[in-house]
Image: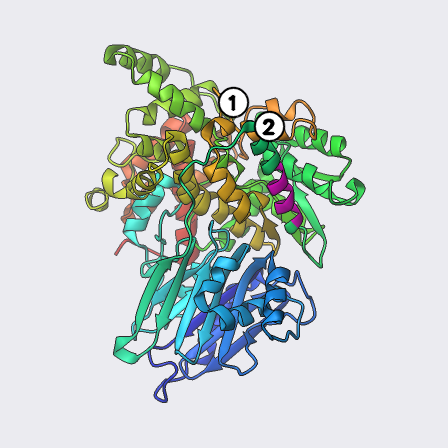
Amino acid sequence: MCGIAGLIHPLAGTPDAPAFPAEWIRTMTERLAHRGPDGEGYFEAPGVALGHRRLAVVDLETGDQPMASADGSLQLIFNGEIYNHLGIRAELEDLGYAFRTQCDTEVLVHGFRAWGASLVGRLEGQFAFAIWDATEPALWIFRDRMGQKPLFYARLGDGSFAFASEAKALVSHPDLLPAAVDVAALASYLTYEYFPDDLCIFQGVTKLPAGHSLCFRTGGDDASVDIARYWDLPVTEVPIPWDDAVGRFTELFDRAVERRLMADVPLGIFLSGGLDSSAVAASVVRCRPPESVDTFSIGFDDPSFDESMHARQVAEHLGTRHHEQSFAVRTLREVLPRVVEGLDEPFGDASLLPTFLLSEFTRSHVTVALGGDGGDELLLGYPTFQAERAAGLFRMLPRPVRSGLAAVVRRLPVSTRNFSFDFVAKSFLRGVEYDTAQRHALWLGSVIPGSEDDPLHPEVRSRFGLDAVLRPVRDAWETGRTSSDPLSALSYLYCKTYLAEDILHKVDRASMAVSLEARSPFLDRDLVEFLAQLPRRHKMRGMTTKYILKRAFAHRLPKAVPKRKKKGFGIPVARWFQGPLRPLLEEMLGPSRLAASGFFRPDVVERLVREHVAGRHDHRKILWTLLSFELWRDRYGIDSRS
């Protein structure tokens, strides 16, 4: 994995193109150094500046970037891995292209020369790459299908086009963009805990959506940006008998895992002990001797959050070389500044911290790690898919009965345990009365826009209410509904929103902050398309989620693994806010600080803190989302909404 950045002037490719100041691209690229500690490279010409930071994984000696075509007219910078690059290389060699390296980067250079933008349809991998084509002249950018690798862009005051792997690179120099808050993005962040669609917290910065390409054609005043979708998740179910489905799934999964073992550096596996990561580990040991396979897990001093014993059980069953480490709350306080430093945007999903700790621990042993991300979204694995079925039954009850049940649930005593009954029941009720797409966003997220607990300043909320904030999930739901099954439509929605912009964002930032490359076999294109079109009954039967995965891997894993309830990868934030993290919470969310910034209502936030600390209500999600924003705002020195 790597970090990429670039600047293209509207006159690039013409005799009148000015040169960018050299420090601009160097400052941008330096902000991405954590993504590529093994080297840096630049290409500069009138109106063009490209920068690259390299994490060497394949072809350690000759894979430096930017990489040029033989005639120098193409200049490419690439973040990611192309798992089928050897097959594409063979095709290109048959067409007469000569290779001077063994890396996948050169395949992209020759592939673009041979097939143009249609090259991206041939690629299997995780990637964000940019190609400056001096013959057009134009800049082309591509982002992978599921959104594993990030790409942000902006138009500068003079019309220049700037892009980078992380948004913070675009505000790294005073002559590029000022670091200001996009309040529309903030309004959405409070609900989702992440930034959906193409939103970014920095004003003037936009995110290229997954599965899209972008072309910036220069030409002075006629310079233009064209964005196109080159791939989408299938939504139509394809009938397949059960036995055939199990056989095909197993074949595709094992092949996806084997593809992701490609590396010239040490490689390991994130192992939580849950079904998805355990399936990945079980597949790896079919390719390699178990005693040579490194697995990694972390634990916590709160038993309701600790899963290390389950990971240990799986590792012992498979015979892997297992590594584990346990953390306490003091570790969180110590690591929090480093996590915030690595973020270019606030992030309200508290599982970022254990993901960072796991990545840092894993990186002390290996450079590449495989994980199980994507399994829950593609195989209907979240409890919210079960809750969707329960919601249908609940909404059939007479309204007085529903109101009575809600009153009982509201009186349940508050628990800070992970997935406690009161937390689950209250979360269910907070979203159940909304439409399907809306309730899933509210079940997963923090703030219901316009509710009594909404801390956003009223003037901002008046412009970005419930309908505006929930538009991305509503749009994804409408596209997914062309499927005949509502749960399959929800799978599409989750892949396009929660997976792409929460889960994969989290894994990318946490792993790349410590220069670790993370790979997910579940996101292999062939496997994704097969699972997206698999009939729902093969993925969920009754209330049993991930049905085909559990049946296909029953003989490879300990019997307890498929039967375990999903726990999630969390930390005891609710309890820590009442104890060791309380001083930080009260400092960062203090009334005078919030009043000065103008983003939030101090009275509402003060009440949320007071109620949570006293144990009267569990506001862990809202408070963590607010704390993450304030820590981020402090990091970038943004004083106020104005």
Quarter residue 273 falls in: top right
Q: Could you tell me residue 7's position as x and y percent?
A: 41, 73
583 or 332: nearer the viewer: 332
Rendering coords of residue 516 (x, y %): 62, 53
Q: Which mark is residue 344?
A: none
Residue shown at 74% from the left, 39% from the top: 322
- Quarter of the image containing the N terminus? bottom right
Query: Is most of the magenta stretch helix, strand or loop?
Result: helix
- Report the magenta residues as a range: 250-258
Q: Is residue 515 visible?
A: yes
Q: Which residue is mark 1?
A: 544
Badge 1 element? loop
Q: Is residue 359 above or below residue 217?
A: above
Q: Amino acid at mark 1?
A: Thr
Q: Nearer the viewer, residue 34 or 98?
A: 98
Residue 417 image point, x, y percent: 51, 24
Q: Quadrant of residue 94?
A: bottom right
Q: Is residue 398 above or below residue 374?
A: above
